Image (cartoon, rainbow, N blue to C red):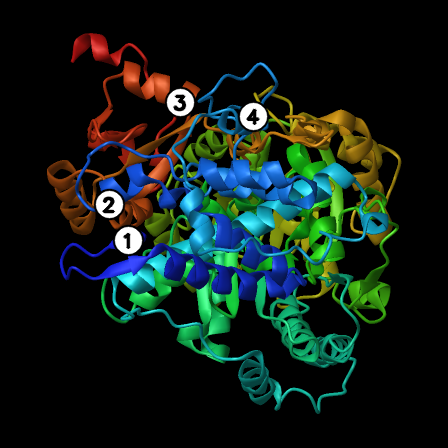
Amino acid sequence: MEYLAHIDIDSGRKQRIKDHLEGTAERARKFAEQFGKSDWGYCCGMLHDIGKYSKSFQKRINGESSQQVDHSTAGAQLCMERKGMYELLSYCIAGHHAGLPDCGGMSDRNGASTLMGRLRKKIDDYQSYREEIKIPKLKTVPFNPEKAANLDFSLSVFIRMIYSCLVDADFLDTEYFMKNGQVERDSGNSMNVLLKRLEKHISGWLPNNELNTVNGRRTEILKYCLKNGEKGRGLFRLTVPTGGGKTIDSLAFALRHAVKHHMSRIIYVIPYTSIIEQNAEVFREILGEGNVLEHHSNVNFESSEELKPMQLASENWDKPVIVTTNVQFFESLFASKSSKCRKIHNIANSVIIFDEAQMLPNDYLKPCISMMEELLNHYRTSIVLCTATQPALTTFFKNETEIIELCPRMKEQFTFFERAVFQNIGKITEEQLAERLAKETQALCIVNTKKRAQQLYRKLKGKGIYHLSTTMYPKHRRCVLNKIRDKLQKQEKCILISTSLVEAGVDLDFQNVYRQLAGVDSIIQAAGRCNREGRRAKENSVVTIFQFKEKEYMPGQRQQMDITENLLAEDWDISSLECIEEYFKRLYHFRGENLDKKRIMDEFKKRRYNFAKVGKEFKLIEENTKTIFINREDEAEELLKKMKQSGYTKSGMRKAGQYCIQIYDREFENLHGAGMIRPVSEDIKDFYELVNAEAYTEEMGLSLEIDTGMALWT
């Protein structure tokens, strides 16, 4: 009898189960080889679909029955019967379509979605697999237990990695068969080629040894990063002051390091999409368009021929340089669904750079650090923590991991790159602040809330006064930023009222900066926009720290503000490296157990792992926002028509993101109550369009001053 795994209905071609298992196993073996566990990948691939040997599945695939057949449980039950290390594969095989399951308990009945429920499930006889398939041997252990900071968590990460190898290999083998080998994937150039391109790009800079100049200092740091790229795999810090050139420095280290250790890719993990887009553009110019994959919510992969390989690469990160977000990176590593997990095996044997490392999520800091430690200890990665405001993370690494600094003479560099002086003026009123700003020529004022930014802008509104916040959709913000850059370059009047979105990844150079009291890291980042290019004397560029006398609602910021206020009262030098470290130590101490607020680590204990639960719970951005589509441009109008006619599509939603803003539930209730918004489509949850055009202005975006009684009169 011929046992079939797939049939291509259009051509009538058939793929035997044995061929599919061998093809998947070979791919999974190759993937797992990146972290030294090829035998585990091969074994998992060979056993994942043995349930297809049942008569009921063969009837279904041959069109003799329409009954759904569970083919995933068989391999899981077989692995559990063999016991020992094979038991770990049960999670992977049971979940290769439905997602990694929770362990469950002894009370779970036959058919429950947990692993225990699946293991008790009565399934059709699949023993015909013995005619064609031998169970491969597992020759290695998952890892050296002496290197495991937390044995259960380490095992859970190992299961995730093997699962990722399996689901990606399964998908690729099926795709190869269904497309008859005509696959449009392109993995890009080798690290050797990319390093040569970078070396050519920076060759003109390297002779500069003038340490009394900005470019000379930048070159010194760059050379040091190249030299340290030769060091062994491990944990590194790149603590570079604003303007020190850390984007190119980190790339230089990563490429030299990757070539030295035969590593597969470089992954940049960045908190803001604005920085991602900026950095990715720099990388593409140096390394070539086809070698850099942006993967975040704002990127739009068209289905055109030239972009199809990039769209395919986004599914499993099969490119040499990946630029992504904290959200995408960590949520994938803690996900349970196969679509999100496909990529994570490609994190192994990579250089991972956390840009703006101070933005690692505090609410999930402990599980995130634990995951980073696993990648360091067991998956052949190197990690670089890259920022001007280095968080105090050393104590979170259980195995006393040595952290190597990549910035030479770090303290001296920070002294050299100082561009401004700080002053703390304490509490003032909104009117007093507006009076100060009205006397400025080129100044940036950053406040903590969108509502406050709009209120302050209204008080100052006039020629040369600008507003920037997330009440404006991304395309609109970019347009305003271009106007601001033009004004600054021409030395014309430019007063910008903004929220914290300009603090990182936005290259603006103001004479003076005003920053509402916030975390020390935020204040330092804001200061990076003051005299950024060093064209003015340090004493003529002032960063003014202030507080408002008026109370305001600031969820999630109170602790940071209180710690900074205490440090200022204790006369700490707010810009010093010692103050930054002290700030983070106090912040993490006060947070305590809230550094793992969902108790993620508790879900991996005593060999009982709750993958599905964690996949739902681990959300860096909580689901308490709604999306509002702003229809005020021709392209936006066309997109809206298509969405209403054709419904939800991934490409449509990616394009729509350029015209969308996110609002919290309180703001949503006000808008909804005023009759200003309506759902775009019943197919798309939490997606609305603004129907009152007057509520959105060129100056401020969406107004947050909504009269909630308006709907009564419309």
Specify the quadrant of the image occupied by residue 669: top left
Q: Where in the figure is residue 86, as x and y percent of width and height?
A: 63, 44
N-term-proximal mark, 3 vs 2: 2
Q: Secondary structure at mark 1?
A: strand
Q: Residue at x 65, y 74 (%)?
A: 258
N-term-proximal mark, 4 vs 2: 2
Residue holding disc 3: 667
Q: Where in the figure is residue 533, as x and y percent of width and height?
A: 62, 68
N-term-proximal mark, 3 vs 1: 1
Q: CA distance from mark 3 to mark 4?
A: 44 Å
Mark 1 touches mark 4? (CB < 8 Å): no
Say which amino acid is labelled 1: His
Residue holding disc 1: 6
Mark 2 touches mark 1? (CB < 8 Å): yes
Residue holding disc 2: 61
Q: Where in the figure is residue 641, as x and y percent of width and height?
A: 12, 41
Placement of 443 over or under 106, stated as above or below: below
